[in-house]
Amino acid sequence: MNSSQEKRTLSSSEGQRVLRIADVEHFQWSLFEADTPGAFSANGSGLSLAAAVELASIETHLSSAVSDMRASIRVPNCSIWSLLKASGWPTHRGCVELRDGGFTVLVLPTDAYDSWWTERLHQLLYELRQNGFPARLARGLTGAVAEMVDNIWQHAETADPGLLVYQIRRRRFAFSVADNGVGVLASLRKNPRYKWLDSSMEAIGYAIKPGVSSCGGGGMGFPSLLHALADLWGKARLRSGEASLTFDRTQEERRKDYSYLPFLPGLHVSVRCALDAPPAQG
Amino acid sequence: MQRIKVREITGLDTLAGKSGGARDFPKFMAAVEDSPEGCTVLLDWSGVEIATASYFGATFVPLLRLTMTGDLDRYLVLTGLNQTCLDELKLALEVPGLVALLGDCSKNGTIKSVLLFGKLESVYIEAFAEVQRAKGVSASELHTRQDRSRNRIGKTGWINRLSSLHRLRLVRKQKIGRRFVFRSVNEES
């Protein structure tokens, strides 16, 4: 980036605080409103998993859309971002597994025919069980991840590979499945029944319903995901185009929050869940 | 009865996604077509850890539809599904409004009894239960047998109910003389 150009910088103001989705959304709004190069820096302990993957997508989109308006994104001491940044958005499809700092980053293969992918699913199932998830929930979560990855193969329509990043800790699991494809709106509009949809927000709202798909006989992926999360605490976020939808079960009362955001290509599905309720606030 | 071990025909214990289903559907189809026409096919999911709703939607659901349209003259019974797979199967059946049969098998592999899995109106559930109890029954037998103190169902009512169950491939239908006899799919003549 030209140093003489104006920068809009968003950084962690609380020292070691991990930057989260809200910070990334703020950064994206600042880029959107200012229409000038932006800089994002995390000075502390890095980014949350979902934030890292969304940032990678923002950077990829900006660099490909407007070459002279690159966003400078620096996140020192954060291995997950280093991995994603170093690879750009991975240009070569498939069969790459990187493990660092408790994160597993998978650059996904082109289709379900791959035995490597089946082995990775076995590994994920094994790790979930080893970390205290009962068999039924571990199977449900592994199946949900597989469904989200299959969505990429079915609907993304991009040469860029999909990414799966996950982290498992004792009785906790976080993952993000992302692609730089056409997104939920363009995909659903391929089905004549949903041709009338004209916003990402409407499209996401429909996509989570059983049986809604760009082609006949599909539309089970999101219901599988939501079913797998039904007995767990945490959050699930779907982000595509100008919309995000968050299922929040960090409290007894479940909430569903929609919000409008600047455009993000493809579909990002990020989940953070736990077997135990979060500690009570205050 | 023909038993098909899903774990063996697919070579996998993790069966996920529509893509995976599209890959494996020809294997299911070939295995089912290998069985004699009109027979009961037991799809044994033992050893399968994960099978997702999309996978069922791309494999079992189209097979079930083929049996219902009469293009595939078989009776499908599922067995050996773990709880996670059952949850996913339920999702897969809910959207198209289909009903499947779950088989309870004995140690020697024969089907002891079958259960309905999916949403079905209560009148059909009652008729299905009558067929399971009777081990071969006609509409007129059910009509004459019913409790006279309750609201009686007409003979046509029984014919419609039993015929619908057969159309869904949930009971067998056999012509004996001038009458149709309906029996459980685990009773092969």
Image (cartoon, coloured by chain):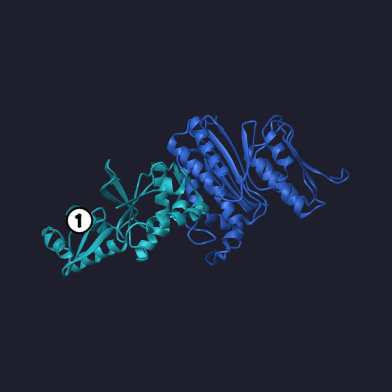
Chain colours: A blue, B cyan
Q: Name the one closer to the observer, A88 or A49.
A: A88
Circle 1 crowding by C-alpha within 10 Å: few under 14, some 14–19, many from 20: some
Q: Is residue A63 left or right of residue A116?
A: right
| Residue that sits furthest to the right in the current view | A4
Query: Taking the image as drawn, is residue A8 in sight?
Result: yes
> What count of labels does the image hold?
1
Furthest-bottom residue in this view = B178
- Picture coordinates of residue B113 (x, y %)? 25, 48
Which chain is disc 1 placed on?
B
Foreground of the two, B44 or A232: B44
> B68 above or below A150?
below
- The residue at which mark 1 appears reads as B130
Residue A179, compared with residue A213, is above or below; it is above
Q: Quadrant of the N terminus of chain A?
A: top right
Query: Where is the C terminus of chain A found, in terms of image quarters?
Result: top right
Secondary structure state at the residue bearing disc 1: helix
Spot occupied by residue B132 in the image (x, y as percentages of width and height): 21, 53
Horizontally, residue A77 falls left or right of residue B68, namely right
> Which residue shows up at 58% across the image and 56% down it?
A155
Name the one closer to the observer, B63 or A263: B63
Q: Amino acid at mark 1?
A: Glu
Q: Position of residue B69 (x, y in %)?
A: 36, 66
- The structure residue drawn at horizontal position 72% and vertical position 37%, both measured from the top left corner, is A82
**What residue do we see at 43% from left, 38% from top?**
A136
Across and down, in percent, residue A170 comes to 53, 29
Can residue A259 be spotted in the picture? no
* Quarter occupied by residue B174: bottom left
In-front residue for pair A27/A79: A79
